[in-house]
Amino acid sequence: MAFYVTTPIYYVNARPHLGHAYTTIVADVVSRFHAMRSEEVFFLTGTDEHGDKVVRAAQKEGMTPRAYVDRISRLFRDLWPDLNVRPSRFIRTTDESHMAVVSRVLQRIHDAGDIYFSEYEGLYCFGCERFYTERELVDGKCPDHQTEPETIRESNYFFRMSRYQQWLIDHIAAHPDFIRPERYRNEVLAFLREPLGDLCISRPKSRLTWGITLPFDEQYVTYVWFDALLNYVSALGYPDGERFRTFWPAAQHIVAKDILKPHGIYWPCMLKAAGIPVYRHLNVHGYWNVDQGKMSKSIGNVVEPLQMKDAYGLDAFRFFLIREMTFGLDSNFSEAALVQRLNSDLANDLGNLFSRVVSMTHKYFGGVVPEVDPEMGRQYGLGLGPEALRTIAEYERAMNGFELHKALAAAWEFIGRMNKAVDVSAPWELAKKKATLKQLEAVMNSLLKGLRLISGLIYPVMPETAARMQKHLGLDPAAPFYLLDDLKLWKPVPAGTRLPKSVMLFPRIETDAPVPETAADAAPPPAVDIKPEIDIDDFRKVDLRVATVLRAEPVPKAKKLLKLEIDMGERRTIVAGIAEHYTPESLAGRQVIVVANLKPAKLMGVVSQGMLLAAGEAAGPVLVLPDKTVTPGTPLK
Ligand code: MSP
């Protein structure tokens, strides 16, 4: 069996960030999962390098487009090995072999009569050198230049996409999981309820030269999607390559919801018109937001994958991304949530289980896996065998259906079951008496078997940790220990195996947020001195807002002051006298309440545009925080 998976090819006008890393890690995870099934896997990623945006970005840097795309493309290519992501090929739309395929497919569709020449009228921004749709404009103006676009007429080539509308509707009806999860299939069907227009696929060379020349008209280049989407077949050596024959029938794409329409509509229609069979599945995921909002360079909240790796470890980062996001829905990224998962799922549930079982093997059996009498094994094997098979079945079902979070949840249920089994069987009690030695052997053997299975199940998401577990179970980390057919055999760690000393798989991250005093610990409340009554209008004068702390830093030479950058719908700077009680790290990403209409005041040379709300405890201020995360700028009432 073959398996072919692709990520979008990323634009080279931005550095790789969390969003790109997520999709590509997902592709790596599913590739490794299919390797667990002994399938032949081809995993494609790459960069999308043509178009006027690239030309403008290059000009800004004073570089030629060629030098510029080489530089940014390399950033992407070099990132993947650092994230333990192993694509089979990294494609670039500037590769000669890709450009030749685009040319060939364009010619073929043109010959078939599905590409025609026609006049086009649209709203054009000369600053951006591109057309805008009405919906993209803000108050009728270009969002970048704040100028009104001009209506211009231009002749261009069009792909007769409308011809394939009914065919696509029928195809989706006949293959209900063609686009998944279901919500995105429904979204595509909703688009298809409206008449599908034709697709403009060219730009005159007078305006854009950085692209692939149309084979039937020297004066034009292809524009965006016709070039980019075809990478999925050109990478396999379409039309004649052996790879194309092997892998294309098993093609699955992964994209986020932002490019659903090109992948769910344009691409199948293009394939149909070119006489190429359509892909198997389009797997669509949601967006990672940061602080409940869009990740953006201007807000300054772009998450750098390598920074996360350095701070928390690569496997913890990969685990968090896959476990936290329900594939298909949006998720919020925060370091606090990452630390929470690291401490609970990884350090506590998995890490503790592992070190407990390995340490006990050392303590009771000198680190050598004991021989078990099969009858004792049946009697005292903790019933983990049937549970293991159920877990593998659910894991396989979920992974196969791109419900990656559920596959991990199934593995963690099994880990939970094992932790309970340790507590219930209490090996430390069994070790006290000779009479229960056989029982102890059976219990420990079963627990080691369980760990062996877990190391296989976590392999796609945490390959390094899986190999470490193997090593510390005395097994060969370089062997393909993760094959599903082998895992299903529920094999023991062979008797006589010598285990290296136990290790801590995941160190806990200690958060230094102040621990609030509990009511019981606190001193008796001070006598309450309530201020004179006010009426509701007086209260309404105070504009209280929820804000997200983007960054915090000490104010030089001021022991008590922290300078906070906050997002309150707008960005502001606030100086707060909390430095002795809150560290800058503990505040970043948290939401606070701000008095938004307080007259600005200068504190130690920094202008503070508001004030934080805190309880004035004698021991020091305690910040007032919203119960749940809300949109920054939300007023209090
Ligand atoms: N070049 C086109 C794709 C052509 S594919 C034939 C493109 N490039 S892109 O650089 O903008 O990448 C978009 C993709 O990056 C998304 O579909 C998704 O895979 C990933 N993400 C970018 N930001 C993201 C988030 N904030 N969250 C999750 N994934 C996101 O579109």
Image (tube, helix red, strand yellow):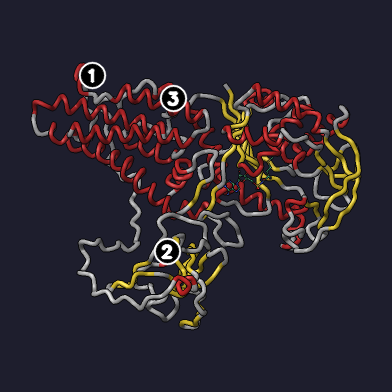
Outermost residue toward the top in this view: 375
Camera-side residue of 490 and 559: 559
Per the image, the residue denoted by label 1 is 378
Horizontal side, residue 131 vs residue 438: left or right: right
Which of the marked residues, 2 or 3, is nearer the chain's N terminus? 3
Which of the marked residues, 3 or 1, is nearer the chain's N terminus? 1
* SS of the residue under disc 3: helix
Q: Amino acid at mark 2?
A: Leu
Q: Quadrant of residue 196?
A: top right
Horizontal side, residue 549 vs residue 243: left or right: left
Q: Is residue 453 above or below residue 465?
A: above
User: Ligand 1 is located in which of the four quadrants?
Assistant: top right
Q: Amino acid at mark 3?
A: Leu
Q: x, y (%) of residue 257? A: 62, 42
Which of the marked residues, 1 or 2, is nearer the chain's N terminus? 1
Please tell me how crowded label 3 is: few (under 14), some (14-19), or many (20+) other residues with Cα within 10 Å.
Answer: many
**Which residue shows up at 43% across the image and 41% down it?**
464
Please tell me how crowded label 2 is: few (under 14), some (14-19), or many (20+) other residues with Cα within 10 Å.
Answer: some
**Which residue shows up at 54% across the image and 45% down it?**
330
**Which residue shows up at 83% across the image and 30% down it?**
109
Whether disc 1's CB lies below 8 Å from ligand 1 is answered no
Q: Is residue 141 visible?
A: yes
Q: x, y (%) of residue 37? A: 49, 24
* SS of the residue under disc 2: helix
Q: x, y (%) of residue 408? A: 42, 35
Q: Amino acid at mark 1?
A: Arg
Per the image, the residue denoted by label 2 is 587
Q: Is residue 88 visible?
A: no
Camera-side residue of 4 and 325: 325
In the rendering, which numbered label is found on residue 551? none
Per the image, the residue denoted by label 3 is 484
Look at the image and tell me in which quarter the N terminus lies: top right
